[in-house]
Amino acid sequence: MRNAFILPLATVVILYTLLPLPLKAQMVPDRPAIVRVVDSLGNDAVKANRIASVSVAMVRAADTLVLRAWGQAKRDEPARAADASTVY
């Protein structure tokens, strides 16, 4: 009688573990999460590496996720911040 319950339960557990689940690498992060990470990386790159500026453009299909710059547009003009249209 006990085996009549355990075998179906074991079968369900095994099948459930074999179901195709999305892997973490396949999950697409949302825009605010991407912006937070890229913003942090841009700020850290300018501060830690003592570089003038960093520009990033990130696109997914036809959607622009990030279009941003950090740092100075010119080293000799510290008041002029870099922006997405800064030409290097």
Image: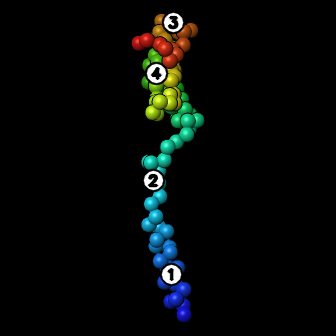
| Local crowd size for mark 1, using a 10 Å CA cut-off: few (<14), some (14–19), many (≥20) | few
Amino acid found under the numbered disc labelled 3: Glu
**Mark 1 near mark 4, Cβ–Cβ under 8 Å?**
no
Residue 8 bears which disc, if any? 1
Amino acid found under the numbered disc labelled 4: Ser
Separation of residues labelled 2 and 3 (CA atoms): 47 Å
First in sequence: mark 1 vs mark 4:
1
Q: Say whether residue 79 is visible.
A: yes
Question: Of 58 and 82, which appears nearest the observer?
Answer: 58
First in sequence: mark 2 vs mark 3:
2
Question: Where is mark 4, residue-wise?
Answer: 55
38 to 14, vertically: above or below: above
| Local crowd size for mark 2, using a 10 Å CA cut-off: few (<14), some (14–19), many (≥20) | few
First in sequence: mark 1 vs mark 2:
1
Residue 43 horizontal/vertical position (percent): 52, 26
The quarter of the image holding the C terminus is top left
Separation of residues labelled 1 and 4 (CA atoms): 58 Å
Residue 38 horizontal/vertical position (percent): 51, 31
Most extreme residue toward the front is: 62
What residue is drawn where x is 54% and y is 90%?
2
Closer to viewer: mark 2 or mark 3: 2
**Mark 3 near mark 4, Cβ–Cβ under 8 Å?**
no
